[in-house]
Amino acid sequence: MNDQAPSSLREAQRALKNRKLSARELAEACLERVAAVDPVLHAFAFVDESIASSTAPSAGEDGPLSGIPIGIKDLVDVRGLPTSAGSRVLAGNKAPTDAPVAGRLRGAGAVVLGKTTTQEFAYGVVTPGTANPWNIEHIPGGSSGGSAVAVATGMCFGAVGTDTAGSIRIPAALCGVSGLKPRPGTVPMDGIIPLSWTLDCCGPIARTVDDLAPLWAAMTGAPVRLPDPGDLKVGLPEGSSLPFEVASEVGAAVEEAAAVLAVAGFAMRRVTLPSFELWDGPRMAIVPAEALAAHREAGWYPQRAELYGTDLLDAFRRAESTDAASYVSARRRLEVLRGQFMRAFDDADVVLLPASPFPAPRRDVFDEPPLPGERPSLVRELTRANGAINCCGLAAVAAPCGFSEGLPLGLQLVARDESTALAAGLAYQTLTDWHMRRPPTPSTR
């Protein structure tokens, strides 16, 4: 996309409204961008090459997202397009109908360019085969890695992701874009292949928090009403101790973000949070068990076991030894931990935390498969930093907050509801410019 093209969803909306370009021209520009950079980055699993010719030139006057090109994670059904979930298990599968969330976005006028890449059935944080746009030797995060990469590089202006233990926030943080992890149940999950019925949620990824709002309104079918950010109290972990370990540069970036908010006049509060490591055991009992149940119900496992990757096969085999009592015990443990976490909101509206404990790791770190029954420590650390938020049923906005050796760093603002998280994220981005940075074009390296 050329330098005169819109650089954000809001800019694209204004350009369409003011007739500086047509919806067809915008779709064609995005497809040209895909053709230029996606052979290197591999953000799309499928691109609908016919979408520009089928887009009305005058689109942009009706729905709130009319004429806006978006990507949808290859876990979500879009009528007439493949849904493979990044797996050989679903090779050749084509969706007969839209998932409700896809239908709402298309009903709002969004133009679906194609399906973005995901780790197999959303189980993982790497998105193998997809490269980080800031350095192609590093991972983009996952499992919604393709959505974050497509947005970061201007291939589309927004994208749909899912999040079970960070799958929106991790790639948003590692790719330098913004993402909203909503509360479970705020967006219908019908037509979206489940990983964990009780923890899954579906939300938007965009370049800025301001861009997230119209996507979120379309996904929920309701207007977004943000509270006055000046009234928000921001919670910070007691002392200098975060509830999980982070790299020094991440800790420093989050401290700087807190200082920016404090100088701007936000009321800062100290809160006590339980160690996020406490969630690991129960969460890793629940997610594989629910995934196994979903794949059994669908008739995919064990009937097509030979087509699965090793990560999921290992998870299923561990889940087969999880009995009902163990599952219920894990659910009960999560409720106890949730009660402890929620005390932080007695005197705070949002809690400021890192969205990733470190910048994007190199891809070759994940080339060697782990031993059976084990997950790479980096995977565990990434999901630990985010999974507790899912287990508590909270909303969170991820946003860029710095760089380390050319790679983005990200924070998350956790709240009881999406509007509060969005208001806090928008306020932060009015005070900083990290979200304005753009990755280089891959071919220039």
Image: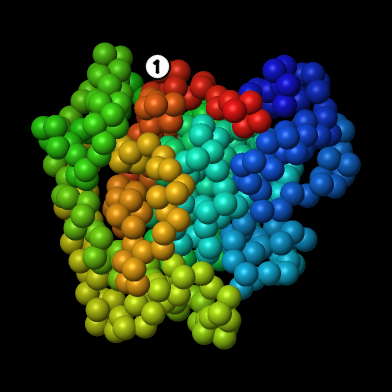
State the residue in front, 43 or 24: 43
Question: Which kind of residue does numbered mark 1 sit on?
Answer: Leu
Tell whether 377 sits left or right of 368.
left
State the residue in front, 248 or 211: 248
Residue at image x 46%, y 62%?
Answer: 123
Inspect this view and state whether residue 201 appears. Answer: yes
Residue 191: image quadrant is bottom right
Residue at image x 85%, y 47%?
Answer: 50
Q: Determine whether 204 is above or below 73 in the image.
A: above
Inspect this view and state whether residue 212 appears. Answer: no
Tell whether 239 sits left or right of 152.
left
Q: Secondary structure at mark 1?
A: helix
Residue at image x 45%, y 78%?
Answer: 293
Q: Determine whether 419 is above or below 285 in the image.
A: above
Q: Pinpoint residue 181: horizontal percent, then vertical percent.
A: 44, 46
Tell whether 368 sits left or right of 147.
left
Q: Residue at the far top: name it.
A: 263
In which quadrant is the N terminus drawn?
A: top right
Q: In the rendered image, which residue does mark 1 sit on? A: 431
Mark 1 nearby-residue class (10 Å; few <14, some 14–19, many ≥20) = few
Q: Determine whether 412 is above or below 22 in the image.
A: below
Q: Pinpoint residue 25: horizontal percent, then vertical percent.
A: 83, 30
Q: Pinpoint residue 252: horizontal percent, then vertical percent.
A: 25, 26
Q: Pinpoint residue 39: horizontal percent, then vertical percent.
A: 69, 43
Residue at image x 25%, y 19%?
Answer: 259
Q: How many labels sit on residues?
A: 1
